Image: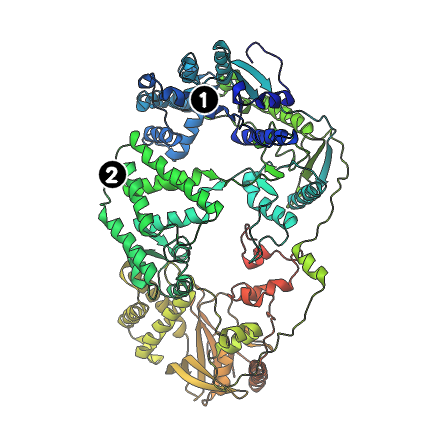
Amino acid sequence: MPGNPSPLTKEALFARLAEGHAARVTVVTPNRRLAQILKSEFDAFQFANGRAVWEDTDVLPFGAFVERLYEDALYSEIASDLPALLAPAQEREIWESILEGSGLLSASRAAAQAMDAWRLAHAWRIEGALDRFAGNEDHEAFAGWSRRYLEGAAGDIDAARLPDAVARLLPERALRRPATLVAYAFDLLPPQTRDFFAACATNAIEVRRCGPQRAGSGPSRASFKSPREELEAAARWARARLEAGAKRIGVVVPDLGERRKEVVRTLSRVMHPGHQLPGRPKTPLAFNVSLGLPLPDYPLVRAALSMLRLACGEIAFPEASGLIRSPFLGGAESEMARRARLDTELRKKLPARLTLAKLIGEVKHCPALRSILEAVISVSRAIPSDSRSPREWAQHFSALLDAAGFPGERALDADEFQARAKFREVLEELARLERVAGKISRDKAFAKLERQCAETLFQPETAEAPVQVLGILESAGLDFDCLWVSGLTEEAWPLAARHNPFLPVALQKKAGIPEASAETSLALDRRITQDWMGAAPEVVFSHPLQEGDRELLPSPLIAGVPESAVEIPDFPSWRDWIFGARRMESITDEKAPPVAFARVRGGTRVLADQAACPFRAFARWRLAAEGLEEPAAGPDAMARGRLLHELMRRLWSEAKTREALERDLEAAIARAAAAAAKEAGLEGRFAELERARLGRLAREWLEVERERGAFEVVSLEESREIRVANLVFSGRIDRMDRLPDGSHVLIDYKTGSRLSPQLWLGERPDEPQLPLYALSAKEEIGAVAFARLKTGAMRFMGFSRRDGLVPGVKAAGSWQGLFASWREALESLARGYAMGDARVDPKRGLETCRNCGLRALCRVHERLSPLSVDLKEDFGESEGAT
């Protein structure tokens, strides 16, 4: 610091600030969060001293202070001589334009690193040595890019060079210079910042240092079995300290970016049980997470980008589904129920990807939605998609959103309002690219908008929270009533050196950039650790002992801290509160009313579902419940099954007998494949590919059929009524062959890889269709068989009355005994269904539930302990689900 004057204490600083604007004291901090917290602490200081009203204090980040001085000069008589200040997006655009032809795999990512290298080079005064200092090809390339960047900037200035430019302007009277400039918590002072403070001192500005007061307490160390248990303990500790009266509680999570959702979920569960229950009023949380989310993670911005993406091309159906149900489109409130029903209908008919025109054509019974979509497509077509300026595209995107009724009918809440404002700022940044970029296509303009949103971390402003969850850098310079620093394993702390690849490592080390080498990085992390130790009267360092199968060791920077037990009370969860209240009512819901009619809907599939899980059969065929479908890219498994059935029906309609297989059937195969593809509605190149695939499959299957003896196909896709236990089911027999001895073979086409005749056996057979057909047939049945139509594994498998009837089909031990066991099992299933058996009883546990779309209805997961089963693995739930 210039002249190295004695530092101010925080009390002395607050006393100076309490004098008001007349004292002309400005405080600068290394980051925005520290400035906000310091202002909050000053307000608490004033309130504690009995003040009811006081002047707002001038505390702001260093970069914002420099920009304010620059803006003062812009509104003075010297404005004409000043260079224009480039916005970060404009800087990025210039770097990208330079790197686009460099052959790099990702010009955008390299541009971001180049911007960082440019900032470091000026902050640490090494920009002049780039051309003279020997380096590798990357360093030489960056030196060349830097020269081209200055040419592309065309005399404009950027944030990296602004402090030097403003330092030269300090003698100007137009600048509102403070009498005293206080640098608060600047532990690390790059040469550029130090030179700026020196220039301030030269121009009659008193420059003083100040920092947080350190408590000097002895920290403790705690270890936990896993990172999850560690985070849970930190949350319970924070709640206990809050209830004990602590006003400022800090929880540091080193990998906060990766664990943000887990952190929010854990603290919400511990500190606000029941906070996310439907119908609960939205109240302020007791904690605040310092790290924001990417802007598209906010539903309002995600809906806006989806609408623009749909207007510019095509989108995947899940994204279109979310857009249809979004509350941020015009008419969303009045058509809420209609749009929900529309979504379920469109899932059955729309392709995996769709355009705006395709969507409009399918929108029925939602006039407001159709109206806004037609308005969007009208606006979209009004402007040609050729190259235009970024400003024109930004205006066009705004017009598209206006046509869509964005952001909807209902009033926005505080978070949504701020997210909308931030999105507008990003649109404005896109428009400002006009200064440095030429005309671009619509797709490129939208890609830039998407990237800017994705790279913008945003967190709505909320009321001050007593518990602050911070990353490592955000915790620097802060003091607390109590502090918990988690995750301090030897792998996580100290941080590994991360030098910028575009600057010579030796040059970075010589300049003293902390991240450039292991030694300087270790020194910085050791200093941060020391600051943590004195940041609060109570400090807890913690680390997990194991992560998965890996054993973890504590960081060497805290290994000397004595390990001791930390008082961590156990707070009940919302579920514990419910059970603790003992207001429980037990209702037997396993029994539904008996079936009222003999004829049941669902066909033979009813008994298959009854065998898999009685509740599944009840929900599907009596309640008509079904999971939401999702269009697949191309035919899904069910559609492919229908293709195969149609192929076989068409083929055997022509072939009919074993003797026909000796003829040339290529024409018949081609006709059958073409008819099946047409029946499925396939067109173009995709239909051509399917015809070829079906043809190969048919030829391979006919080779299996040629191994059989004489037979005649007497039935194809024949519908029949089947009576079991006074119930009437409808069925469709894939195929029935008659053998020379007069007996018949029932054949069921399947494509699965786990086929086996064992699926017909047991009290709850998985595939009861063929046994049902065999029991109800008027014909004499000599064999039942699966026809496995799987390329490379085609074969018959099943049971027969005697060996040799069908290749690969073995004789049952007792043909009559097999039929008797089938009859007993199927009648038992039919009686259970008829009498209303609706138990949640999956035959193979979670394996049966894996592909069932009714889990939200039966709530089978509530029968399981979350400690004994990995619900994410078994049910496919996402990491961020709550």
Q: Which residue is mark 1?
A: 66
In this view of the protein, which residue sits in the foreground, 111 or 485? 485
Q: Quadrant of the N terminus?
A: top right
Disc 1, SS: helix
- In this orientation, does residue 133 appear? no
Question: Mark 1 Cα within 10 Å, few/some/many (few <14, many 20+)?
Answer: many
Label annotation for residue 388: 2
In this view of the protein, which residue sits in the foreground, 655 or 760? 760
Q: Could you tell me the amino acid type at mark 1? A: Val
In this view of the protein, which residue sits in the foreground, 217 or 442? 217
Dot 1 or dot 2: first in sequence order is 1
Q: Are marks 1 and 2 in contact (CB under 8 Å)?
A: no
Corner quadrant of residue 106: top left
- In this orientation, does residue 389 appear? yes
Disc 2, SS: loop
Q: Is residue 403 above or below residue 341?
A: above
